């Protein structure tokens, strides 16, 4: 079985940065990822606003990718299926084709995916008014009307958008609720925020871009809110199937890491959207991937 110093799982900004730094440190590194690049291309356009590729850090991610492709000897273009801690330290990883590789350290950078609404228009208008990331796209909505769909986890998005947008319709589905936290009170006090609690989204309509959000209330009443943006803010779901029973997770399923990207399992590090680190953004994921590789290097150095 092939043995490495480090196995990196995931080929997005965090995984590529971790692999790049591991190569720079002359470590024997393997990268397991079905593809390279991760989620770094999100063209976004609105009426009167030409399409922008607003992802800071995409260039750097591509530079890492080119370097990794040129220098890395052990790239496995497939998914990891299972992680098994070894007696005496280190980990064994089973790949999609059932082959096994092992290493002293693991860096998990498997990312996260958005929770969808699954209504008509959601994917049709994705990038043309529909967004899953207020951190990334709020700035485009100055003086425009937007809707935010979600519960508790949508509050920061409503707060961010209400500072810029003309109106923010906050739609909370029937079954969801929000705690009466300080943030909730601050958000709901804002005269630009209009709460639609116990309303469900039926669809998102538009022409070239989003023009309205269609709702139905508990008594069957329907409403069509005039908006240019719809933020689906149920939170991102971390891709943690591999480590669910292995490491400590927070209440939303993120891998808990400390400031050195260590998990509660010695030798197992994690970085990027899959972790509990604040702000799902490409530059953050890059920095976290770098930190994880440096910490894995220190861990290995202490054992030599
Ligand atoms: C809709 C949307 C818009 C966004 N817009 C922006 C933006 O404008 N600006 C910005 O900075 N950020 C934006 N983000 C956030 C940004 O995409 C992420 O923060 C960043 O990509 C996280 O990098 P990552 O490496 O942690 O994960 P990802 O980029 O998700 O990469 C994860 C990698 O892990 C791989 N993987 C998954 N499971 C396995 C497995 N079992 N085995 C091996 N590999 C696996 C995947 O194939 C992928 O290569 C947006 C996110 C979303 C969802």
Image (cartoon, grey):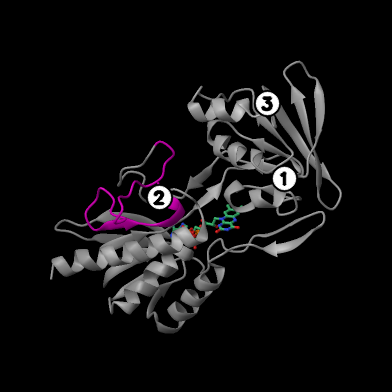
**Place of residue 110 in the rendered image (x, y in percent of width and height, measured from the top left):** 44, 57
The circle drawn on residue 275 is 2
Q: In the picture shown, does residue 299 fall above or below 60? A: above
> Residue 81 or 195: which is nearer the viewer?
195
The span from disc 2 to disc 1 (Cα, nearest Å) is: 27 Å
Tell me the quarter of the picture where residue 150 sits. Answer: top right
Residue range in magenta is 251-277
- Disc 3 within 8 angstroms of ligand 1 (CB): no
Confirm whether the magenta stretch covers residue 289: no
> Residue 211 or 159: which is nearer the viewer?
159
First of labels 3, 2 by sequence position: 3
Q: Which residue is mark 1?
A: 122
Eye-nearest disc, 3 or 2: 3
Seen at 54% across and 50% down, the residue is 113
- Left or right of 192? Residue 56 is left
Screen quadrant of the N terminus: bottom left
**Place of residue 50 in the rendered image (x, y in percent of width and height, measured from the top left):** 77, 62
Disc 2: CA contacts within 10 A as few (<14), some (14-19) or many (>=20): many
Residue 100 visible (yes or no): no
Confirm whether the magenta stretch covers residue 275: yes
**Place of residue 291 in the rendered image (x, y in percent of width and height, measured from the top left):** 34, 63
Q: Which residue is mark 3?
A: 195
Eye-nearest disc, 2 or 1: 2
Q: In the picture shown, does residue 129 fall above or below 74? A: above
Seen from this angle, which residue lies furthest right?
207
Residue 122 visible (yes or no): yes
Q: In the picture shown, does residue 171 fall above or below 264? A: above
Label 2 secondary element: loop
- Disc 2 within 8 angstroms of ligand 1 (CB): yes
């Amino acid at each position: 079985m092939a043995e490495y110093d480090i196995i990196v799982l995931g080929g997005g900004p965090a995984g590529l940065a971790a692999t790049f730094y591991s190569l720079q440190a002359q470590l024997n590194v393997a990268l397991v990822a079905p593809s390279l690049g991760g989620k770094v291309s999100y063209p976004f356009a609105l009426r009167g606003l030409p399409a922008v590729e607003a992802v800071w850090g995409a260039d750097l991610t591509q530079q890492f990718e080119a370097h990794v492709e040129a220098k890395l000897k052990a790239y496995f273009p497939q998914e990891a299926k299972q992680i098994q801690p070894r007696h005496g330290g280190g980990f064994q990883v089973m790949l999609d084709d059932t082959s096994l590789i092992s290493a002293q350290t693991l860096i998990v950078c498997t990312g996260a995916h958005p929770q969808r609404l699954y209504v008509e228009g959601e994917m049709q208008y994705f990038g043309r008014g529909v967004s899953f990331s207020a951190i990334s796209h709020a700035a485009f909505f100055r003086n425009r009307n937007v809707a935010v769909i979600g519960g508790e986890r949508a509050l920061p998005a409503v707060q961010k958008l209400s500072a810029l947008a003309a109106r923010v319709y906050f739609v909370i589905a029937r079954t969801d609720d929000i705690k009466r936290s300080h943030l909730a009170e601050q958000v709901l006090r804002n005269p630009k925020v209009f709460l639609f609690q116990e309303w469900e989204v039926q669809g998102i309509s538009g022409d070239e871009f989003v023009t309205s959000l269609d709702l139905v209330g508990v008594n069957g009443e329907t409403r069509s809110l005039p908006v240019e943006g719809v933020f689906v803010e149920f939170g991102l779901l971390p891709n943690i199937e591999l480590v669910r029973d292995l490491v400590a997770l927070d209440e939303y399923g993120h891998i808990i890491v400390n400031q050195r990207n260590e998990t509660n399992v010695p030798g197992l590090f994690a970085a990027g959207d899959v972790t509990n680190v604040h702000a799902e953004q490409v530059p953050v994921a890059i920095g976290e991937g770098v930190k994880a590789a440096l910490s894995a290097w220190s861990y290995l150095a202490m054992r030599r």
